[in-house]
Image (cartoon, rainbow, N blue to C red):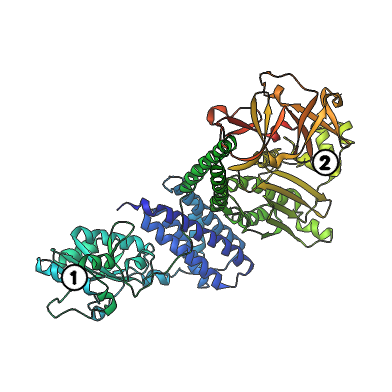
Amino acid sequence: MDMNQYLEVFIEESKEHLQTASEQLLVLEKNPEDLSIVNEIFRSAHTLKGMSATMGYEDLANLTHKMENVLDAIRNSQITLTPEVFDVIFLAVDDLEAMVMSIAEGGDGKRDVSKVVHQLDLIEKGESPVSSSAAEVAATSAVLDTEEMTEGEYDEFEWTVLQQSKEQGFNSFEITIALRADCLLKAARVFMVFEVLEKSGEVIKSQPPVELLEEEQFDQQFTVTMITKESSEEIKNKIMKVSEVDNVVMHTLDLEGGRHAVNVKEDQIAGMDNEGQAADNAIMLSSDGKEKKKQPSVKPASSKTIRVNIERLDILMNLFEELVIDRGRLDQISNDLDNQELHETVERMSRITSDLQTIVLNMRMVPVETVFNRFPKMVRQLARDLNKKVELEITGAETELDRTVIDEIGDPLVHLLRNAMDHGIETPEERLAKGKNEEGKIHLKAYHSGNHVFIEIDDDGAGINKERVLNKALSNGIITRETAATLTDKQVYELIFASGFSTAETISDVSGRGVGLDVVKNTIESLGGSVTIDSKEDEGSIFLIQLPLTLSIISVMLVAIQDEKYAIPLSSIIETAIIKKEDILNAHNQQVIDFRGKVLPLLFLKDIFEVPISQAEEEFLSVVIVRKGDKLAGLVVDSFIGQLEVVLKSLGNYLTSAFAISGATILGDGQVALIIDCNTLIH
């Protein structure tokens, strides 16, 4: 039996159970007397233990069993909950998460957990002996009531198959299989049983129907009817070899005594023109090729969601991107040819493609909850390490982002939360002295606005000390005294994003090594986003992150630089302008213009990208005004071509060092246009 087909389900369900355990532990810590919460955590641990054992991950199962023992003792009031006990259980969950991640990444799930196991053992030894869990006792046996094992009901077609099989020398059995009470992957065991049976004969019917068995919509036992030339003893022995099968009862069908309660409606029989149609109505193939009988009277439970491997979505996205490129090509051809029917067809295709684009992009959207879920436990542990009291409030976790953005945003948020914990929130003593509640609050909020998602991290801590930041920036050589005198409060706050900046007096494991916030800014800007700060001393700080909804298909302004075409993301563009050459000024070895009362530096893209000159400069220059945070710049191009949606393609491993180029796209006429990274150009 190849268990790989169940690996994805195991990984996803393991993550869900561990997430439940983490969340409930945080709730339990605030309500230690509520044993119903302990029961919830215990159920998650017990389920994970059974799944791990079934899949053969013994280290994972053993650690979960140790944790389960402690939880069982807690719910039976044999162990008192203390902060130290909570710490050990949280450590165990951390190790379990690491082991599951190892399995998800193709590893064996092994990990040195001797430390946490020793601590769990100490907790057990310090209290009364731990009793066995009720679920384990119940799992030791499963008894079948053989008196209820009666022959099932068969329709016209099924009965005909059974009769003809008998005439050809086959045995007909009704077999009732009981699984162990602690069996977790019941569908997997059903599949294994069917695999055994189909090697020995043919399955005619199952009760419940196969659809429900596949969805685990049954208790611990199910019945199948099969025809075979093997004996009942041979069949029983083979089934009993399947793991977690507790008992098998064989019942030989009596085909001499007439058909047993055939419940076929008259109109069903009348509607069958021939035996072939009857067969067609009675048999359908399951997804793994097994034949199964239609049960008109039993309606399978429908599911509104399905799990799809992300690789399939990536393939779908790649195919759709090719479709977008071809749509652009058709638009180009349509504009070149004077054919009304072609114009109408292309317009209709464009509308349909736009609707399809919305659907495809929505399929890739993932709630930020998948990232936010890990933060409550992290904040709890940091608060204990820093001897602070902190409450984390999360809102808008259901807000959705493209998976590619979700994959990258986790680490920056970790840095910002750690910064808020270390530099923002004061100690309980300091907060009380300031007249504040001794417990600090951090509010993590996500919300949509237009084509962007905003994430806020708001704390009610000490805020940012402007003078301290300026002095540190001056001593580190980040700014000069002349520059410092011209900075606004917001510009001073943003100095903490400078590389090598840190206001920490001592180096700690939490922060203060002069790295972190500069990485945060670079990562967010590489995603096409921005991060800003607002702060009031002794009242708190707000970090605001702006992110694009998706990175795969973007809107751009297409421009010409000599004979080459480049694309500038619309998310970076403020506006376009036409200027006279005589309006250009020089300041500090930089060409600038006066743009609405502001000094705007000009960047000549033909010089930056070393574009071969084939046309003489004109008197008027085309300028694209772009921004990076609060900074503006004017990109000088030769002409504007227009706005369009393009597919962002990577330049590959060999061109990653290309300056100020984030990727490329294929235009409708087949040309390749490079996509400009405005964040790299603006300093």
Measured as percent of width and height from the top left, residue 545 is found at 70, 48
Q: Look at 55% across and 72% down and name the residue there.
A: 35
Task: Tell me if residue 299 comes above or below residue 424 in the rendering.
Answer: below
Q: How crowded is mark 2: few (under 14 residues within 10 Å), some or many (20 or more)?
A: some
Q: How crowded is mark 1: few (under 14 residues within 10 Å), some or many (20 or more)?
A: many
Is disc 2 placed on a helix, strand or loop? helix
Residue 592 vs residue 652, the one in the foreground: 592
Contact between marks 2 and 1 (CB within 8 A): the answer is: no
Which of the 4 quarters of the picture holds residue 487?
top right
Q: Is residue 632 left or right of residue 454?
A: right
Measured as percent of width and height from the top left, residue 43 is found at 47, 67
Q: Which amino acid does label 1 sit on?
A: Phe
Measured as percent of width and height from the top left, residue 116 is found at 51, 54
Residue 28 vs residue 562, the one in the foreground: 562
- Do we see residue 113 in this rendering? no
Which of the 4 quarters of the picture holds residue 203?
bottom left
* First of labels 2, 1 by sequence position: 1
Residue underneath mark 2: 492
Task: Tell me if residue 215 comes above or below residue 261 in the rendering.
Answer: above
Measured Cα–Cα span from mark 2 to mark 1: 82 Å
In the image, which is nearer the foreground, mark 2 or mark 1? Answer: 1
In the image, which disc is placed on residue 173?
1
